[in-house]
Amino acid sequence: MVKLADYAGGQTAWCPGCGNFGILVALKRALVELDIEPQKVLMVSGIGQAGKLPHYTRGNVLNVLHGRTLPAATAAKIVNPELVVLAIGGDGDGYGEGGNHFLHSLRRNHDITYLVHNNQVYGLTKGQASPTSDSGFVTKTTPQGAYNPINPLTIAIAAEASFIARGFAGDTEHLANLIKLGIQHKGFALIDILQPCVTFNHKNTYAWYRERVYKLEESNYDSTNKTVAFEKAQEWGDRIPIGVIYRKERAAFEEQLPALTKGPLVRQNIDPTKVERLLEEFV
Amino acid sequence: MPVDINFMIGGEAGQGVQSVGSILAKALAKGGYHIFADQDYESRVRGGHNFFRVRASDTEINALSESVDILIVLNKESIDLHHKELNGNGAIIYDGDKIKDVGKNESLFAVPLERLAQESAKNKLMSNTVALGAALGLLGYDKNIITSVIEQHFGTGEAGKANIAAANTGYEYARVNFKRNFTHNIIPLGDGKRMLLSGNEAIALGALAAGCKFMAAYPMTPTTTIMEYIASKAKDLDVVVVQPEDEIAAINMIIGAAYAGVRSMTATSGGGFCLMVEGLGLAGMTETPIVVVLGQRAGPAIGLPTRTEQGELEFAIHAAHGEFPRAVLAPATVEDAFWLTVKAFNLADKYQTPVILITDQHLASSYATVEKFDLSKVTIDKGLLLSKEELAKLGEYKRHQITESGISPRAIPLEGGALVVTDSDEHNEEGHLIEDAETRTAMMLKRFRKAEGLRREIAPPRVYGVTNAEVTLIGWGSTYGAIKEAVDLATADGLKINLVHFNEVWPFRAEAVSNALQGAKKIIAVENNATAQLAHLLRAETGYQATGKILKFDGRPISASYILSQLKQEVR
């Protein structure tokens, strides 16, 4: 049995009280509860405070460039589907710099789980607006206030994502459960995580979220109804839903690759006699 | 009498210029001739002006020729544009029913292409095949070979039969109606066993022979056909080809795939390569083996999208922020394209760093005959890759272990049980991010020790021609065949001239290059660019200076005759 101690990692460099701690706790808990060994886990992380997470636990780690988690993570999954692949990054990383990869990875439905630490602000570069900053959010680069945030959930629904959830870093038990569902889901699982930033975001604080968040599973919400999901995904303000927003069963990208029917790509070689036959075609 | 005959097929996009060209090339290759065929096309799907040149010789050739013996035109514009390239005794095959007002020109040979196509194949569209038959009729070429090549191209069904009928009609028409004495009678030299393929096809085959299991690329002229070829064979060879959203995704995908344990590549042109540059640095930092094919076209920006240039040598060598080791290989010929692709994969694995295979539109889309690649000579060297047993013995695994060679033993996630940790931030031996000066310095030194090993793997330049030359030409990549031919012609003319040519450029073999150039009296750089980038590199690395430059940057390939004409101005 996998124990929590198997996921004990190095010293953290996050601010005391950072929402990232809650996400780290929830992730470890999900992996332990699913009895997944660290050797089977691949964490592909981006740049930003979220991108440091893999260093504070154990597993295979590929820390990449800002915004580029998804291409690297999805390709690693294709090469070895036996790996549990987690992409980890922030809102700037995934919804700003990596926006194009986000759209197309959703569309292709790679079988990975994507954790977006969404604190609505840039932490590593010290407090600038992010693509999800609330309208009017004043920062050094947006002295007149940020305007019109993007909504990753409605975008994901429109891109036909097959699993979309929203968690809250202040409720680790609930979040751990969402991460478990995401990992178990066959296809792309987006988990957008409301993450308080205690240093740079004095608006969307723990207290602010606690007053507003409510759990979808506590009502009889139907997460398979796309129209309802689209409405729910737009709810923001006095009440903010968390839980599984939308799910749809459809074939994962890897399931459509003929080469993978013969096992993981990493354990296959190319037969030279087949290459010899190709050469003959040019004679 | 030695045979060296050059055909040109000219017409609009969509008229079948390429189809006639490739069948002609194949028919001559089957007859045992050496072929070099190149294409010139515009960035459009229909219309415009395209041509395809097929040069056949009884000795090895690796370059185009600009003087044409048989010009097959599918529209009038092709006569206007190309009649001046015709040799004195050449012939122009055209549709006399359709193209009028051609003036008086002895070389014109009118063939009712469309009418004969309708009569023989019940299809006017096959007039290009009638023209092909007429051209081979002028030569009195072996009809059985023509038939078999058409069958290979169109199959043995209705399309094949109709095309054979069309070709036969054209052939017979030429035998009966061509009254001039055409000096090129070409008989097959034997059963041609050589392969006829393009530079891109050679790269694709090289990648498959090297065991490349994953390719991600975004379509871009002139390398798209590499991806298309591999994708067409992916099911049979169990390869995965992904066309992602952009080139940034492509390079980051192959980094993810290579990290997860398979040989991976991408292919692009300069514009796409610009987008890949940050990824190149990621591969350098995380010590991930990747192969990037950079098929140059004329830049900057969109430039001339379907045309050739060598404007990115220095870019390939220096692309990305920060410093890390890499190799840059520049195939000179179609044969080179195959073997250097294999080598690129081996170097990438052995030194755990990116390898760039730099070609250009000219090499990418030109066809040449080569002896069939001997796959028994292909070695797959994955370098220091730890087995399960070795990892178990090791106990603690450090992905970026500091070693004397700079090469850290590699492990693959899940395959050996070790945790594989790497970071785009500077990191320690375990792969965790660090900021201290001491570890940073140790890691930089470790990575650059790999460059020394890599340098020893790079072949010195090829030297061709006399040893005590008055003039030494230098060049790199696809210009090899043209420069070599220029050296032969100038030598025959009495000039003491040689060639120092690079097909493996980086890391630069300064000492070997200096030895090759020792005593050189006048060095002239021959390059398909405006700034003589190899000459810069030569001066920076060795102090040798090219005092003459023969450059071409009009988007068209360099030929031997162009070099000779420029050489006359450089050497008086």
Image (tube, helix red, strand yellow):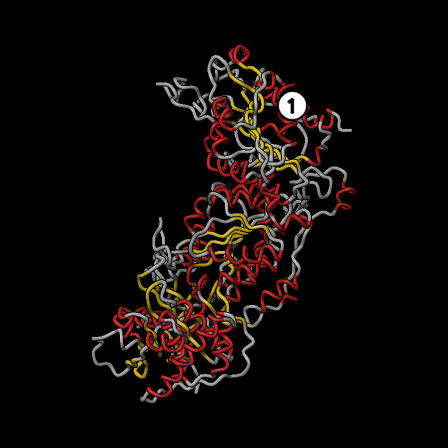
Toward the viewer: A8 or B41? B41
Dividing the picture into quarters, in which one does residue B116 lie?
bottom left
**Which residue position holds label 1?**
A177
Q: Quadrant of the N terminus of chain B?
A: bottom left
Q: Residue at x 55, y 25 (%)?
A: A245
Residue B474, x across and y down, in percent: 43, 65
Amino acid on which the number 1 mark rests in the picture: Asn
A4 left or right of B542 in image: right
Residue B274, x across and y down, in percent: 43, 46
A106 left or right of A61 in image: left
The chain to which mark 1 is attached is: A
Q: Residue at x 46, y 33 (%)?
A: A97
Toward the viewer: B292 or B465? B292
Q: Residue at x 51, y 77 (%)?
A: B148
Does the image show residue B77?
A: yes
Toward the viewer: B254 or A140? B254
Q: Is residue B123 above or below residue A206?
A: below
Q: Is residue B4 above or below residue A220?
A: below
Does the image show residue A51?
A: no
